[in-house]
Amino acid sequence: MSESAAIRQMRGQATRPAASVGGARKWGRGGCGAAGAMLSAATPVRAQTLPSGQSVELQEVIVEEVSGRTTARFRFLAPAIARDGGTVRFAEAERDMELLCEAVALPYVKEQSIPAQSVVISLADREVEFGTANPEATQFFEAYRVENDICVWEGL
């Protein structure tokens, strides 16, 4: 499947907003009902769509508003970033996260009318509950400002 075909496939799957503005709501595994399960299960990003060659799977989307600023968090499972046995290092995953912001997050927030000012892309080698620490897990994060329909790296 070509990159553009995979992106079109993902865009066609997201049919409901991840959260209402004014609070955080989770969609994905264990999230808010059937729509969340559909989003998680139906939107894998195939290896050929990412610069590193890794396959990732959308775990959940969390939309939250803090101090009047809306952030959409896209959390992906990425087993290839594991410390032990992983093949993708942070330098390679940075390009993947940028593509995920541009090709998955931006179309989703636009189609769902989520007024996100920022997007956080996270990759984890295993499921980690949002907001909890897991010293065994490898996790990478990048934050982007949404500006003129593009992802602008925030340089955390």
Image (cartoon, grey):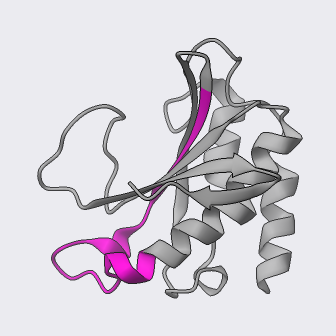
Q: Quadrant of residue 50?
A: bottom right
Could you say where residue 94 lies in the image, as x and y percent from the top left? 46, 73
Q: Quadrant of residue 26?
A: top right
Of the 4 image quadrants, the one containing the N terminus is: bottom right
Residue 13 is one of the magenta-drawn residues: no
Residue 99: image x %, image y %?
Answer: 64, 71
Q: Is residue 78 visible?
A: yes
Instruction: Please state the extent of the stretch shown in magenta in the rendering.
Output: 70-93
Number of dots carrying numbers: 0
Residue in view at x 32 percent, y 73 percent: 81
Q: Is residue 48 above or below residue 96?
A: below
Q: Residue at x 31, y 81 (%)?
A: 89
Rendering coords of residue 70 (x, y %): 63, 27
Place of residue 67 in the rendered image (x, y in percent of width and height, measured from the top left): 53, 15
* Image-based side of 63 in relation to 102, left or right: left
Q: Is residue 125 left or right of residue 56?
A: left
Task: Tell me if residue 51 comes above or below residue 46 in the rendering.
Answer: below
Query: Is 85 covered by the magenta stretch?
Result: yes
Q: What residue do we see at 77% from left, 31% from top?
A: 114
